[in-house]
Amino acid sequence: MARYILRRLAFLALTLVLTSLLIFVITQLLPGDVCRVILGREVGEAASQACRAELRLDDPALVRYGDWLSGFLRGDMGLSYSTDAEIGPLVAERLGNSLMLAGFTLAIAVPLATGLGALAALNEGKWLDNLISVFSLAVVGLPEFVTGIVLIELLAFRVGLPANSSIRPGTGFFEALPSLILPALTATLVLLAYIARLTRAGVLEELKQPYVRTAALKGLPRWVVILRHVLRNALAPTITVVAISFGWLISGLVVIENVFNYPGLGRLMVFAISRRDLPLLQGVAMVTVLAFALANLGADLLYAALNPRIRVGE
Amino acid sequence: MAVPLLQLKDLSVAYRSRRGALRAVRDLSLEIAKGQTYGLVGESGSGKTTLALAVLNYLGKDGYIESGQVLFEGADMAALDEAGLRALWQGGMAHVPQNPFTALNPSMRIGEQVAEAIALNSEIDAPEIETRVLDLLAQVRLPDPARVARAYPHEISGGQQQRVIIAIALGRQPSLLVLDEPTTALDVTTEAVVLDLLRELVRDRDTAALYVSHNLGVVAGLTDRVAVLYASELVEDAPTKELYRQPLHPYTRGLLDSVPRLGQRKDVKPLQGIEGQIPSLTDLPSGCLFAPRCPLAIDQCWEERPPLDHPTPDRRVRCHRWPEILAGEVDAGRDAVEPIQVEDYQPETILTVEQLDVQYPIQRSLADVLAGEPARYVQVVDQLDLRIRSRETLGVVGESGSGKSSLARALIGLVAAEGGEVELLGVQLPARLDARSTETLAHLQMVFQNPEEALNPYLTIAESLRRPLRNLRGMSYAEAQAMVPQLLESVRLPAEYARRLPGQLSGGEKQRVAIARAFATHPDLLLADEPVSALDVSVQANILNLLAELQNEHDTAMLFIAHDIAVVGYLADRIAVMYLGQLMQQGPAEIIFDPPYHPYTEALLSAVPPPDPFVKQEHIRLSGEVPSAADPPSGCPFHTRCPRFLGDICVEQEPPWRETQDGKAIYCHIPIEELQAAQSPVLRFNGEGD
Amino acid sequence: MTTTTNPDLASESAAPVRGQRWLVSLRALLRNPAHTAGLIIFILFLLIAIFGPMLAPYGVNEQIVEDARQAPSAAHWFGTDRLGRDVFSRVLLGARDIFSLAGLGTLVAVLVGTSLGLLSGYRGGLFDELLMRFFDSLLSLPALLLALLLLGTLGPSRQSVLLVIIVVYIPIVARVVRSVVLSVKTRGYIEAARVQGESSARILFREILPAVLPALAVEAALRFSYAIFLASSLGFLGVGVQPPSPDWGLMVKEARDNVSQTPWALWFPAGAISILVIAVNLLADGLKTLFRVED
């Protein structure tokens, strides 16, 4: 197992180097002068020069990449071009908010969705299954900004939940909770359908396996067969699904945060884009990717822990 | 008479499907007495698996009993509620399915899975359960039960997995074992060990067994009675010895005539396959279901479904003509296939293989590469020398992992050999297929194992047949198209098949097309890699005869690869026995079944279950597992399992090739004379036989 | 409880005769009401996209100032927005907008992705290795993140959104195609084709491509639905298609500020996006069942 973890860690490092390179390339090396992009065309030579000097555009690209990456590793992401603030603390604070929202969402969505998915599979073809299937097919197609707005219209004013987040730096979880509910519910709706569908497929696949017959023909009660044999094996692929949905959540949150004016990474990112703040954009992107990659690593390790074929073999 | 243990009364079983009910078993009656072993023989589509599942009352959500009854110890199983059924599964009957690997939960330790089966019907505590688990694993003769109990299914071999399944079945001390092709997924030497175990367990515990199999050999050696199923119906039922001595149904006769006995040869006693194929359950003939394929069918057979008669109190048969067959007035094997004779010719060597090495790299992760771990290989073919002469058939026999398929793939160039030389008709062949000339491709062709994959499902039969003509014989589209009917005719398929897609053909028909395609370029050498192993017995015989016939017609030499030594012996002129990437023995086919043998050949012959209850067979069993080709044994590759192991010399030195006077060569440290003195013929035939 | 496939019924599968195949497929698709609904709605939207300009009573940005902020009525079926634009006309014309944007993006991504996937899967070796590592790192960025990164540099515009769709979906399509190629490549009939001297090009396009098509059809439908999703999300965030174009996502964003006064200006475009995406998803689901494509 230790070997496996080490290998996954090496792989993680490699992926991160590649993605950081990619982020850097996309944001820095696209055709045209980055300062032109940032400042617009009609800017004077002097301002352009100052910008170039500040971004050290006259240094070789590889040197800049190296500096940027080593800075990132030390937690120093430079200054935001539009606000002159340190990027590091800003991103850290927003990351905290986003993770709070994502965590809260997963805490609701995962047990609910896997439960529903398993329930649908065990009742394959019956009304409950059809209901869950139709519901998830419908919900999976709704863009988050639509579900978000619908929830605001339906719930915000009637139940008294805030449609706009009131989270400031230093706000604790329970203080923030009312602001979390609607965005988390929006994200849950979409995730729910997705995870439930895949869980259903996974459980159905396991139900078809001959070992289920072996277990049933031992004379075990049905619930033992389901719990001990079917669900245990269906769990591993479900975890992968959850990890993937975490990645989905990160991007889904960009929209949701903007619907609810939630001060997370996603809104910071849209802010960076609208201000053409490339250093900020890089920082946000890199942190998001890191979070995503770590979630994947966690899922891989958990998967391996549940699946002896990977743990021992390979 | 006491109540039989299991009684099936006019049982019909159907499946719900989109196209209505599919009746997989119809009007079937059967009785199994306590302690009796009952064989159930049939080809795919006969309904035998359905019957086994119906006996267990585990038909899945689409299957149901349409009419009739299953009585276990006199009680109707349909009347059982869920608890009653569970109680029955806990103590009454147990199931051993075909594929042991998928039948075990992949993420649960073996011990836990066995414990589940015993902890249910007894109030015992944990240490006692553990003792019982280890005891059960020991009873099925698993080496080191404690280690196996801690292992996961993928960590033990297929033979061991099947023994675990048997242990699970025995854990509940059932009075009836339902065995559904329990050894089909295993190699023959492993199969022999598992069959011994089953035979012993059934005898010692007085357990009854319903043994479902397509393999006439396995059934012959294991059962008291045999029922033959055809297209959902029981066609014949008799005590095992009587059934094999005098089959009364033409289908039974056809099945027995379709399997080669050890030592049966194409030029002496050709196989008689059954024409046609099993009908679809949605489109059954109205009279006798077998009439369309029966050599004895008369008008009555087409019109009237035959009743199940009792020719003797002990036998049942569903045929209008059994009285004539019993009296010997007609013979279902009458229109015999002509022996396939090869005229005299001057053989010359056309293929020379020297020091052939085939390796597969073991995948290394990037981390391993960075850590400087050396690349590792699986040596599947190891320094192999081979010669094939014009127009002869060289049979290569070996179990899985012997490297026989890799040998063929390396010769054809689908895998590039790591070392060694291959010379065809005096021309040295490049290792890779892409580097070979059109001419070489035309000279050397191949028939693949799995007919389901041999033809592109998206191309018509005509297009599949045109391609070699266009590519390798330089024909125009029109010329190639004009050849298609002729090619189809050469493999006895109607010309209108040209327009069909492979999905509309049966497995046997697909393999015929594949054979026609391979012969289309008039190859000098044909590689046939297990061409019949995926086919039903009755179809297999016709394909084997077809291969021999076309080979004769085209003056083609053939490398025929199979795991079944009887099949190889039937078709080959010379036979090579392969183990762990090396040849163990080679020589003329006629004398492979006589001593002296290589100890591995001897064990192989002893393991094959002969489709004949009257054959006496030496009892030699191999212990242990086939070593990994990633880490092959030193010296003689067979030394880890050899029953005639000499000592250090086998471990330390590679054995010499020793030759007999009649041209047999054996790769062994034991001198020929000593082998000859120590070995007696593995098979001795009583009564008839060639 | 479900059981494993019964070997007794293994040979009982119906293989449609060539030529009838498409008819049989269509009939199978229509057997499921949800899939049928998806197909019908999709065709309806497609017709709207094609004939929208003929049907729309008003121009896209035609402002009828005196009619501003009107609730749905006979004159303005979907009402009018804050600026007095006819919401019905804008929703109709938005269909063409989204079809051309998402459709073109999907088409290019599918074509390029399929070619790369075929080549990479069949050739293998270093080319495959490098391309796949590159795609892996692209895919290790969540799709919307990658889209935002690109937009951040390219600047928000219709062309940027098109490019984003293409860049984001090429690796996904290529992976799907490649995985099918890898599974088909080792089939007996491909090996037989090589033994019969077929050229690589013919093996790729005549022997392998037909096997890829079912999975590709499903993938294309899914990509199209996500492309609509992505384009309208970007529109909503204000970093995609820019005003005053009748992009549905953009319309939702613009109407949000006045949701209490002109809720219809928000709900109709929002509804249009949802219905179209759900319909295409249903269609993809239908294709998946039809062609027995695994997830």
Image: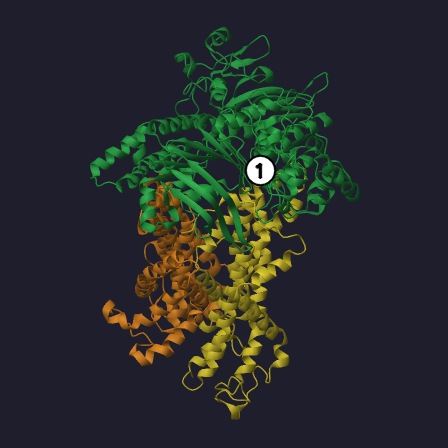
Chain colours: A orange, B green, C yellow
In this image, C54 relative to A8: left or right? right
Residue farthest to the bottom? C66
- Residue C293 makes an appearance in the image: yes
Q: Position of residue B270 (x, y in %)?
A: 64, 24
Q: Nearer the viewer, residue B201 or B651?
A: B201
Q: Nearer the viewer, residue B108 or B34?
A: B34
In this image, A265 relative to C71: left or right? left
- Residue C193 makes an appearance in the image: no
Tell me the amino acid under the disc marked 1: Asn
Q: Position of residue B339 (x, y in %)?
A: 68, 23
Image quadrant where one finds the C terminus of chain A: top left
Indicate the quadrant where residue C123 lies. Answer: top right
Image vertical order of residue B639 relative to residue A236, above or below:
above
Image vertical order of residue B628 relative to residue B56, above or below:
above
Indicate the quadrant where residue B395 lies. Answer: top right
Tell me if mark 1 has few (under 14), some (14-19) or many (20+) residues whose alpha carbon lies within 10 angstroms of its own.
many
Label 1 sits on a secondary structure element that is loop
In this image, B64 relative to B420: left or right? left
Tally of marks? 1
Name the residue located 57 percent from the left edge and 85 percent from the top edge: C62
| Chain for numbered disc 1 | B
Q: Position of residue B497 (x, y in %)?
A: 70, 44
Q: Which residue is mark 1?
A: B450
Name the residue located 57 percent from the left edge and 78 percent from the top edge: C92
